[in-house]
Image (spheres, grey):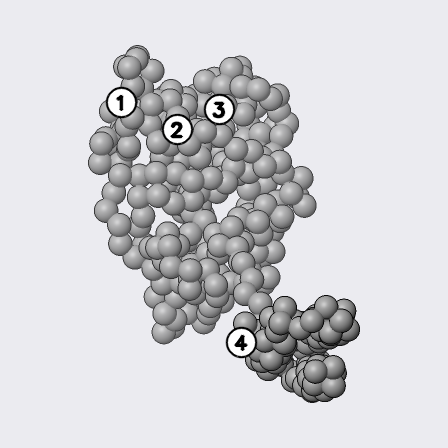
Amino acid sequence: MEEAIQKMQAEALAAIDAAQDEDALERIRVTYMGKKSRLVALTKGIKDLDDAQKRVVGPIVQKAKQAIVQALTRKREELETARDAQAEWIDVTAPGTKVRRGHLHPLTLVQRDIENIFTTMGFAIVDGPEVETEFYNFDAVNVPKEHPARDMQDTFWIQTANNNARQVLRTHTTSVQVRYMQQHTPPFRIIIPGRVFRQEATDSTHEHTFHQFEALVVGDDVSVANFLDIAQSFFSAFFKKDIKVRLRPSYFPFVEPGFEFDINCTKCGGPENAKGCSACKGNGWLEIGGAGMVHQNVFVAAGYKRNRYQGFAWGFGLERLAMMKYKIDDIRHFHSGDVRVGAQFR
């Protein structure tokens, strides 16, 4: 029996040493240590031996069991270490896996470009509430009570408990002008980018929610010539080419005189090359926004003495500029939620 136990121990240790994976090792354990294994049978047979034999065979069986268990434990640790090393191994010659990166929205990119250009020209960036009072949105910027802009067709009115202080979703960023002027004394130059709201039907060029950008310069001696110089400097920097600005008389309640302003076509370059141009429809100019000298009624609403200061204001839609810069043909793409739109501008 002693020889049989020692032979079985040697076979078990050799099999364990030769195991190539954990499944094979488990089969060896069942063969030599399982409930129906020879070693277990021998252990159970000890009780049938006389006392002298028990004293000899018992320690041999226990020693064999310990040797096999220890060998199984070592081999299992060895196989686990090898498996972990294989999992951590990196093939440095394999092509890399492309990591998906986040990206900024095209409107954010355009707004940051605008802010960077204007801050280099000494402008401060100002913000204001999107839920605005009727006073700041209309009265303070010289919009008459009967003006059609106050109609439900153009304005989102908000029902409040106090009807004496009616509120709206702001229809323009001009409302921030008076708020700023009430807290600051000229001279100053500021820009006001922000979201505005209009109750109107949407199509490829109109949205009920969009972004405006406004600039305001106030001082003792400010003129339209200052506006033209700043506007041409800005657009030239934004489009990275020489840009000219053209003024056309127009009416806005908060400025006097008021102008529509155009820039020479960024695609064809201007009227001399405009024939057949799809961007400007052949006239060489692109309509951008409105401008003018700040109406003295607006200064009075801000608490300034009438005719004490002069200033100009001008603004445009951020979506309009983004569509021109990135060749986007439908304004609704900006708010569609389709991640493929923004993914093009990483």
Q: Do the residues labelled 1 and 2 touch (CB within 8 Å)?
A: no
Q: Dot 2 corresponds to which residue?
A: 131
Task: Specify whether residue 255 is in view.
Answer: no
**Residue toward you, 126 or 84:** 84
Neighbourhood count class around disc 1 (C-alpha, 10 Å): few under 14, some 14–19, many 20 upward:
few
Q: Can residue 310 be seen in this view?
A: yes
The residue carrying mark 4 is 36
For mark 3, what is the residue? Answer: 178
Residue 312 on image: x %, y %: 52, 34
Q: In which quarter of the image is residue 121?
A: top right
When the figure is inspected, residue 75 is found, relative to residue 142, above or below; the finding is below
Which residue is found at the position 42% from the left and 64% from the top?
340
Question: What residue appears at the point 36 percent right and 63 percent down from the top-left corner?
Answer: 329
Label 2 vs label 4: CA separation? 82 Å
- For marks 4 and 3, give the one nearer the viewer: 4
Q: What residue is shown with label 1?
A: 159
Badge 2 crowding class, 10 Å Cα cut-off, few under 14, some 14 to 19, many 20 or more, is: some
**Alpha carbon distance from label 1 to label 2:** 12 Å
First in residue order: circle 2 vs circle 3: 2
Q: Where is residue 9 in the image (x, y as percent from the top left)?
A: 71, 81
Residue type at mark 2? Val
User: Which tag, 3 or 1, sits closer to the chain's start?
Assistant: 1
Badge 1 marks a residue whose secondary structure is loop
Reply above or below: 329 against 145.
below
Quarter occupied by residue 196:
top left
Please state which of the two labelled residues, at mark 2 or mark 3, is closer to the viewer: 2
Looking at the rendered structure, the kind of residue marked 4 is Lys
133 on left or right of 303: left
Closer mark to the observer between disc 1 and disc 4: 4
User: Which image quadrant: the C terminus?
Assistant: bottom right
Residue 116's mark?
none
